[in-house]
Amino acid sequence: MYKPLLAVTMGDPSGAGPEIVAKAWADADLRAMARLLIVGDAGCMARALQITGVPGEVRAVARVDDAIFDDRHLDVLDLANVDLGQLRFAEVQAMAGQAAYEAVIRAIDLAMSGEVDAMVTSGINKEALHLAGHAYDGHTEILAWRTGAESVTMMLVAGDFRVTHVSTHCSLRQAIERVTKERVLRVIHLTHDSLQQMGIEHPRLAVAGLNPHAGEGGIFGDEETHEILPAIEQARKEGLDVYPSPMAPDTVFFRMAEKGEFDAVVAMYHDQGHIPTKVLAFAEGVNVTQGLPIIRTSVDHGTVFGKAGKGTADATSLKRAIEVAVSLARGK
């Protein structure tokens, strides 16, 4: 099968991102399914190999075409943007935020130009990002700006458990305001399209209500009646397989996870979708950004400052993110 070329960002160098990347690269099964080009600082990645005990050497390259992708060398598109003498583990630093930001930008540009098939991102620290002068809430906002995407949203994937979000990084008050027919319908479409790209020919979707018991007929709120249900009805008119009414948020995830009734659930806000995903599969979660002109997957965790420099950080989420990126790239 086709072996996609993936740009994998190093993440915040003060965190465990480089070590997690090194561990993922050491997985022979991943190297068999994808060509992994690490985007970041070659010195950081060489130190990560030492810390983790992963056998191999870093090959610093200046261009994608210079990478060879053999089993002995970790190919790093070297941005040479970290002073290891000044870098401190588990501390928020402007230098680290800048290095992480530059890696993300380079990976986006490589994907936009078609030099790589997809990008996979490690964790970044929002405070470090801001200290470096980049006032973004996270990867999603950077991706939307750099690619010019008009509408993006987040899908969390943990095996057959998939959740998309009508809103993510905003206050709960703002999240309620963003529950509109137009926005819900747009996310339904993005979810349907992503599932088809993952190889699910006829996706089955459910949409969670915003309020307890999905509003209980208006007793606990009317967003379901005025905004969510009209979006569902419109999607069904367009031929999408969506459960015909908003579902109670406290049961819909069970019905997907345990009964297998749906391929994905559209959640109304960040914690509504994140909490069940992380309870069920904390280490397995993958973040997929929908609505972009490129493929981007990510770990579903932060910088793991608590394990930085120790070589003990779990690479499972990054491994799964690489697997999902491969699936999406082949589907495209």
Image (cartoon, grey):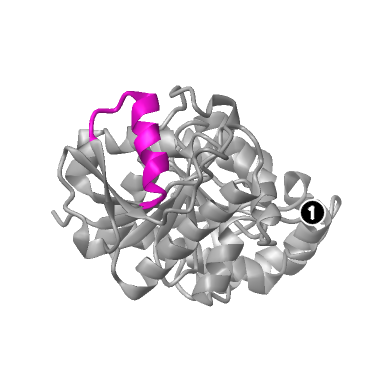
Relative to 133, 307 lies left or right: left
Residue 308 located left or right of residue 47:
right
Q: Is residue 92 visible?
A: yes
Q: Which residues are magenta?
A: 39-56
The quarter of the picture where the C terminus appears is: bottom left
Q: Residue at x 41, y 35 (%)?
A: 20
The N terminus - image quarter: bottom left
Which residue shows up at 25% across the image and 57% down it? Answer: 5
What secondary structure characterizes most of the magenta part?
Answer: helix
Above or below, 83 relative to 282: below
Q: Is residue 42 magenta?
A: yes
Judge by depth and name the residue closer to the eye, 307 or 207: 307
Residue closest to the far front:
85
- Which residue, given by chain and number where applicable, does mark 1 sit on? 171
Please identify the quarter of the rendering in which residue 135 is found. bottom right
Give percent across and percent down for residue 231: 63, 69
